[in-house]
Image (cartoon, grey):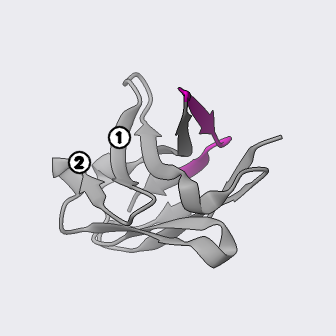
Amino acid sequence: QVQLVESGGGLVQPGGSLRLSCTTSGITFSVIDMGWYRQAPGKERELVASITRGGSTNYADSVKGRFTISRENAKNTVYLQMNSLKLEDTAVYYCNAVYTYLRTYSYWGQGTQVTVSS
């Protein structure tokens, strides 16, 4: 059974930093593409950042230069380093894993709350 467990969310002041972690189990981490999504109240879930199994990264325009996604295959973990946080970064952040073999499989974590507030 594939599981994704996020951690690292919390309350931070504007301009502060947080690092989210997502650890997977039940799947070979090195062959999956990983992503971080977020969903704010009343809004649709949106892609924040993604990293392929080869290490290529992609970012939403709203977080470029502030957020960094990385992965540590030995620990089956993907990270999202968030710096210079803004009020509008407040959302539930979800980890996503995508695996393609004959068809595409997509798995989600339970989400972790990030609140940016003064």
What's the distance in space between the residues labelled 2 and 1, CA to CA?
Answer: 7 Å
Q: Quadrant of residue 85?
A: bottom left
Tell me where the magenta segment starts and ends, as one range: 102-113
Secondary structure mostly taken by the magenta-highlighted segment of the chain: strand
Left or right: where 29 falls relative to 94: right
Give the image location of residue 38, x and y in percent: 43, 41
Circles 2 and 1 in contact, beta carbons < 8 Å: yes
Q: Nearer the viewer, residue 90 or 8?
A: 8
Q: Amino acid at mark 1?
A: Leu
Q: Which residue is mark 2?
A: 60
Left or right: where 36 falls relative to 62: right
Q: Earlier in the sequence, mark 2 or mark 1?
A: 1
Q: Amino acid at mark 2?
A: Ala
Magenta segment includes 37: no
Q: Which mark is residue 47?
A: 1
Give the image location of residue 80, x and y in percent: 45, 65
Question: In percent of the image, x 56 and y 35: which residue is there?
Answer: 101
- Do we see residue 8 in this rendering? no
Q: Quadrant of residue 13?
A: bottom left
Question: In percent of the image, x 48 and y 53: which residue is there?
Answer: 115
